Amino acid sequence: MARTEFIPWAKPNYWGKEKEFVTQALESTWISGGEFVDKLEKEIAAFCCLPYALTACNGTAAIQMAFLAHHLQAGDEVIVPGFAFMAAANMAIHLGAKPVFAEVDPDTWCMTAENIAKCISARTKLIVPVHTYGNVCPMDDILSLAKIKRIPVVEDAAEAFSSRYRGVLAGAMGSIGTFSFHATKTITTGEGGMVITADKDLLDTMFLYRNHGMLRQRYYWHELAGHNFRMTNLQSALGCAQLQELPHIIQERKRIHAQYQSQLADVPGLIMQYFPPEIDPTLWAFAVKLDSRAYPQGRDQLMAQMLEARIETRPGFYAASLLDFYHCSRLPVCEEISRQVISLPAYATLQNKEIEYICLQLQRLRH
């Protein structure tokens, strides 16, 4: 069937009070810091069942704040997955540390304790599980290993906001969890991020680094050489309005996940990401791995064919071992996933009839 209306890969939606809250922030004249910043931090902390949350200007800055709070420095090593968005690896490099890339599970596409253990050395300072596409890494095993080795765990939950592992929210299990509120994420502030923690000392250190090393009580006195990682009151107002609609957003994303699973489950040549029974995912993106026998044209050509059908898709993340500047040894599992994964539209307002059209096109293009 022909289609004229374009289906984008991602699209933010403004559900209710975004304009009202942003207008309130503007009229308050507090457009940098302000009441919506405090409100968003308190509400996210309460949602995550942790005492502390701190906004950041984006998810990558949130990771850097977490690394600085753990005093990451030159010569340290940080274990990260070889298949993931590379924000954590890049922040380690910017702090003079070395990212050490672990293989991922071929079915869940997430890092495991077994593969992490192979990467631990005397220089390992942090373990950073990345909860890819809304899945959650096997945190019990990872935290058990980390406790034995006395290595802190920082969770990159940018893609897994509101996903749960054994009932606990992604990001709420390590020493620090980080979120992204980028325009494509589950809730959005345009750009923006968050750190969550139960550790007051870590919180205080992150607050200083976020705010040029200055305390609230003493203007222009620098306790340390900090950054400006602050989120504006305008962004936070948007986030507060989005957070009000989170139950509905989760419901819609679960609907989309179920629709894709139902329509693609029996399609030969398509392998879906596996979510173990202990995971209750809220997908950031729905992705499938292609069998080259069914799709001999290859992933990139398939993406071009989908675009001709008015459907925008995305490739899988590039494996670290395919990017020369990481100087990473071969990671066969990561590389196979990287070359074969295609990510389909999965925003919360995507309609069932649009999902049906996307799935029909995938089947039509199979050889």
Image: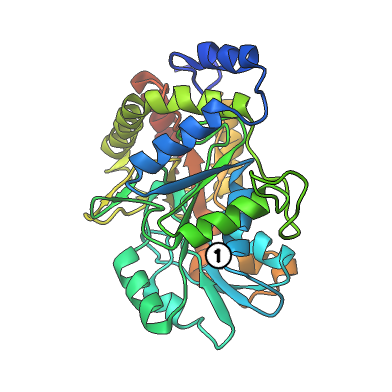
Given residues 152 and 51, the one toward you in this image is 51
Horizontal and vertical percent position of residue 338: 55, 57
Check disc 1 and report its element: helix, strand or loop: helix
Horizontal and vertical percent position of residue 178: 50, 51
How many discs appear?
1
**Looking at the image, residue 282 lies above or below residue 326:** above
Given residues 88 and 301, the one toward you in this image is 88
Left or right of 38 on screen, residue 61: right
- Which image quarter is the C terminus in? top left
Occupied quadrant, residue 100:
bottom right
**Looking at the image, residue 245 lies above or below residue 365:** above
**Looking at the image, residue 15 lies above or below residue 173:** above
Occupied quadrant, residue 321:
bottom right
Given residues 63 and 348, the one toward you in this image is 63
Given residues 263 and 95, the one toward you in this image is 95
Bin the neighbour count of mark 1 within 10 Å (Cα to Cα): few under 14, some 14-19, many 20 and up: many
**What's the coloring here?**
rainbow
**Looking at the image, residue 324 lies above or below residue 163:** below
Occupied quadrant, residue 28:
top right
User: Residue at position x 69%, y 80% from top?
Assistant: 75
User: Residue at position x 52%, y 11% from top?
Assistant: 20
Horizontal and vertical percent position of residue 18: 51, 17
Residue 45 in view in this figure:
yes
- Which image quarter is the N terminus in? top left
User: Residue at position x 65%, y 22% from top?
Assistant: 30
List the single residue furthest toward the bottom.
122
Horizontal and vertical percent position of residue 106: 40, 65
Residue 339 in view in this figure:
no
Residue on which disc 1 sits: 335
Mark 1 is on which residue type? Glu
User: Residue at position x 57%, y 68% from top?
Assistant: 70
